[in-house]
Image (tube, rainbow, N blue to C red):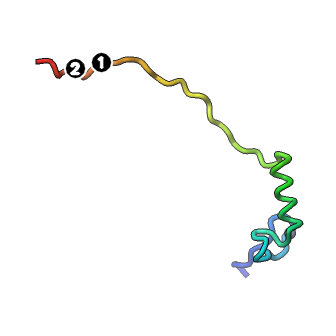
Amino acid sequence: MENEKKCPICGKNQDEKYKPFCSKKCADVDLGRWLKGTYVIHTDERPKEADFSETETCSDAKN
Ligand SMILES: [Zn+2]
């Protein structure tokens, strides 16, 4: 019974056609959650300031 996949929405057995859901209804429910923003997308990205400090350290080409 370990391999038995269940619908994340209602817990019924998944349908091959609507994986991982059991029916189109549940798939729609899941989609609706997405659209409503129930699933929070983690955007912890902060605009990082590019470090454009001009550093000329390797000027050993002089001879
Ligand atoms: Zn379901």
Q: Residue furthest left?
A: 63
What residue lies at 17% left-to-right and 22% top-to-bottom?
61
Figure quadrant of the C terminus = top left
**Residue 45 place in picture, x, y as percent:** 62, 35
Q: Quadrant of residue 44?
A: top right
Q: Nearer the viewer, residue 15 or 3?
A: 15
Figure quadrant of the N terminus = bottom right
Q: Nearer the viewer, residue 58 or 6?
A: 58
Which mark, residue 59?
Answer: 2
- Within 10 Å of the Cα at label 1, are there few (<14), some (14-19), or many (20+) other Cα atoms? few
Whether residue 46 sits left or right of residue 53 in the image: it is right
Amino acid type at mark 1? Glu
Picture quarter with ligand 1: bottom right
What residue lies at 76% left-to-right and 77% top-to-bottom?
16
Q: How many marks?
A: 2
Q: Quadrant of residue 43?
A: top right
Give the labeled residue for mark 1: 56
48 in relation to 23, above or below: above
Q: Residue furthest bottom?
A: 1
| SS for callout 2 | loop
Q: CA distance from mark 2 to mark 1?
A: 7 Å
Amino acid type at mark 2? Ser
**Residue 5 place in picture, x, y as percent:** 74, 74
